Image (spheres, coloured by chain):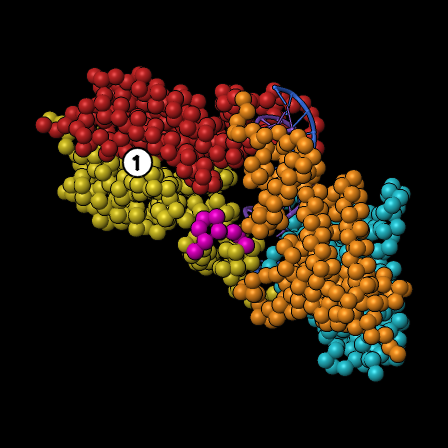
Chain colours: A yellow, B red, C orange, D cyan, E blue, F purple
Amino acid sequence: MTVGQNIKRAISEDQKAERQAMILSAARDMIDEAGFDGVTMSALAKRAGLAKGTLYLYVRSKEELFLLLFIEAMRTVVARFKGDVALGYSAAQIARCMTDHAQTTPLFLPMYARLVAVIESNVADEPLFAAKRQLLALSAEWAEHLAHVTRVSPDMAEPLATALMMSLQGAAQFDLSSQRDPTGLPEDIREAFSRYAFARSFEPSARLILEAVMTPPK
Amino acid sequence: MTVGQNIKRAISEDQKAERQAMILSAARDMIDEAGFDGVTMSALAKRAGLAKGTLYLYVRSKEELFLLLFIEAMRTVVARFKGDVALGYSAAQIARCMTDHAQTTPLFLPMYARLVAVIESNVADEPLFAAKRQLLALSAEWAEHLAHVTRVSPDMAEPLATALMMSLQGAAQFDLSSQRDPTGLPEDIREAFSRYAFARSFEPSARLILEAVMTPPK
Amino acid sequence: MTVGQNIKRAISEDQKAERQAMILSAARDMIDEAGFDGVTMSALAKRAGLAKGTLYLYVRSKEELFLLLFIEAMRTVVARFKGDVALGYSAAQIARCMTDHAQTTPLFLPMYARLVAVIESNVADEPLFAAKRQLLALSAEWAEHLAHVTRVSPDMAEPLATALMMSLQGAAQFDLSSQRDPTGLPEDIREAFSRYAFARSFEPSARLILEAVMTPPK
Amino acid sequence: MTVGQNIKRAISEDQKAERQAMILSAARDMIDEAGFDGVTMSALAKRAGLAKGTLYLYVRSKEELFLLLFIEAMRTVVARFKGDVALGYSAAQIARCMTDHAQTTPLFLPMYARLVAVIESNVADEPLFAAKRQLLALSAEWAEHLAHVTRVSPDMAEPLATALMMSLQGAAQFDLSSQRDPTGLPEDIREAFSRYAFARSFEPSARLILEAVMTPPK
DNA sequence: TATGAATGAGAATTCATTCAT
DNA sequence: GATGAATGAATTCTCATTCAT
């Protein structure tokens, strides 16, 4: 009675991971096309060529899916940071790189903006903890490289990392808020919207922060 | 179709404002008791002693209600900042005040954390624009006082204000994320949760930023 | 405390009638602009320059308003029929006139289509009976003239009138159903929609019926 | 989120069709008991022993449900017409049959009366088009049989069919309007209500029309 | 493993009408 | 007479998740 082509059963761990990657990829496409709210598990299943139930074999919940997606984006950002930013870079250069990474890594910004208030708020403990662990590890990795390239004093490493991440998070919010076709915006607030676009708001702040710790007042 | 007890009619503008204030107050109470998701227009109406339809005479939608609530909180924060922070304050003192204001103004932090991804995302244009205008005005007012007390150079005023607001926004997110009864948290991530509590993450960052602009490298 | 310009109080019966006519006229405009569902009592009041409560001084309910509107349209149709159709007219000519009257009298068709299932179904007894009386009188007047110009035998007068009115009613429905921008209609049913436009469906039927009784089989 | 008793799953197409039939049947019962406005999707689900969501698996919307119901009634009427009316029948006999079919097929008349102004007006395009297609096919089938039994000349077939359907539609309206307990009606309009009962108004008109085309004036 | 039928919670909002001023 | 603040009923439909096959 089964309709449609049953996809071959994924048995090995590899196949399982592969299948999950497929799902994440389909999800990314859906987000691009229909936005976050346009992603429904039914549609995603269809798009991935799976049955709804099968989807849940690879992803415990919709929120977990998003979490997975964000972790990937975060992983990319961290990797790029480690790859691009080297010892000797100026505050301005580091700020530039961070801005660039955040902006050009697909989904990073919009997902970061939704991470806490939308995604984490609706996820079960189990997946949340799992995600937290990974995210924490990635943050640590990033912070470590940051401390390295900025040659910041040990006691300033954490405050610096925190300040930058916090700004990044805030900027992601601002950016989300500023994403709007200026057409249709009332004259008097149009500029305010664009003022908070990511690059415009994050880069100077990051630079400010970095300079503060990289050139300690003598 | 009408039954029930008509409450005293709010005829003058003053009475109307008072009634709206009443509604906002009832909403605040509900949030305290049942959390954001616990706020229902029906329940709110009942609590405010109004008919549902009456509620909508004073608030165009649930999201607008939240926006109104946030604006009030923001107004308070700005007022306190202007009242508490005076010329001559050190970076540390200013950071301390900001932290305190944000933390002790009821609803400010949790609403700010939800402002963009949850509230603004679901509000109609009309109320959104109205809110933006007020929020922008308040921000400007706050930024102006900030520039004044920090004696920052004119060209650094905006970057400073932006950096601080962005950090505040990010910290609000972190804080929301860290709000969790440590009991029940796995050992290995418990500390990470508490690490991002508002005061612990925001104050040092704010101070860092403020110091950076208040003691220009000679 | 009253806001806005209080319209002068309408005292005499004449003034009252005049005010009611004003309201009906405003309603007609609203229907033209926003369709039937676009008419709300609030908006109508505003448009008529009246307060909501005042509206109800001249019209007992929304449905009564529509009934009043239809009666006017019907009155026009009957008057035009009596004015335009004279003894000696052929079945084809009469059918033509009827079609023309129904079609060119504003609101007649769409209101007739909604008369029973939408309007009468939701009106209180009192206004319904009042309307019925007027409508019945108008029908009788129309039927009488019809009998006169068709020189139909006394026993066929009622069946003829009924048949024509029924067809008119049915055609009004068909017409309502066919009112749709052909753009956006699927190819295969586009023609079906247009086929039931009023003139195309009513006139031949009316003619058929009229001819049947006007040229009795010898 | 799932609780409650899963009913037997309808897996095969047959089972699905059966389940839909069950739903329609439950809807018919509800209409009988509580009238059209008494039909609630929630109540219907309960009555059918289904969860609300399940209902929507079989019916896209409430209006579509009504459309489905009408199509069934129409299908019955057409079938009965084809079964009962044979070549050689007189105009009077055909009119009699039509009247009878329309009157004794459950829900046919009241649904036909509401079809355009109430049901079609509130249905989404997709289901509307689907319904139109079926209705059009049924009409054509009926018209063909009509042409056959009346031996009407090819060019008169369509006008005849249209005239009869239009009258039927009009009569359905009249009938709806006349459905009212005479008790409680004012003396002076009581008769008028009953005068427009279906059989009394439709049959003579149908006969008139049929005779007109079946016995062409020599 | 895969499937997809079944589940059901859940709340916002409109607008005709009334009646206190 | 005129006003407009207050009323409140009333119901749809979506979609994440589960679990019988």
Residue A68 lies in magenta, yes or no? no
| Residue located at (87% from left, 45% from top) | D188
Q: Who's the residue at 76% across and 41% down the image? A: C127
Residue D65 visible in the current orientation: no
> Which residue appears at 56% of the width and 36% of the height?
C49
Q: Nearer the viewer, residue D42 or C58?
A: C58
Quarter that holds the C terminus of chain D? bottom right
Q: Which of the 4 image quarters holds residue D21? A: bottom right
Per the image, label 1 sits on a secondary structure element best described as helix
Name the residue that disc number 1 marks: A167
- Taking the image as shown, residue A175 lies to the left or right of residue D46, namely left
In the image: residue A9, left or right of residue B102? right
Q: Chain letter of disc 1?
A: A
Q: Is residue A40 magenta?
A: yes
Can you give x and y, in whole percent of width and height, for residue A180 in the image?
37, 46
Answer with left or right where residue B105 lies relative to residue A86. Answer: right
Residue B66 shows in the view: yes
Placement of B20 over or under C82, stated as above or below: above
Q: Nearer the viewer, residue C41 or A93?
A: C41
Q: Position of residue C159 (x, y in %)?
A: 85, 63
Stretch in magenta: A33-42
Q: Crowdedness of circle 1 by 10 Å Cα count: few (<14), some, many (20+)?
A: many
> x, y percentage for residue C178?
63, 63
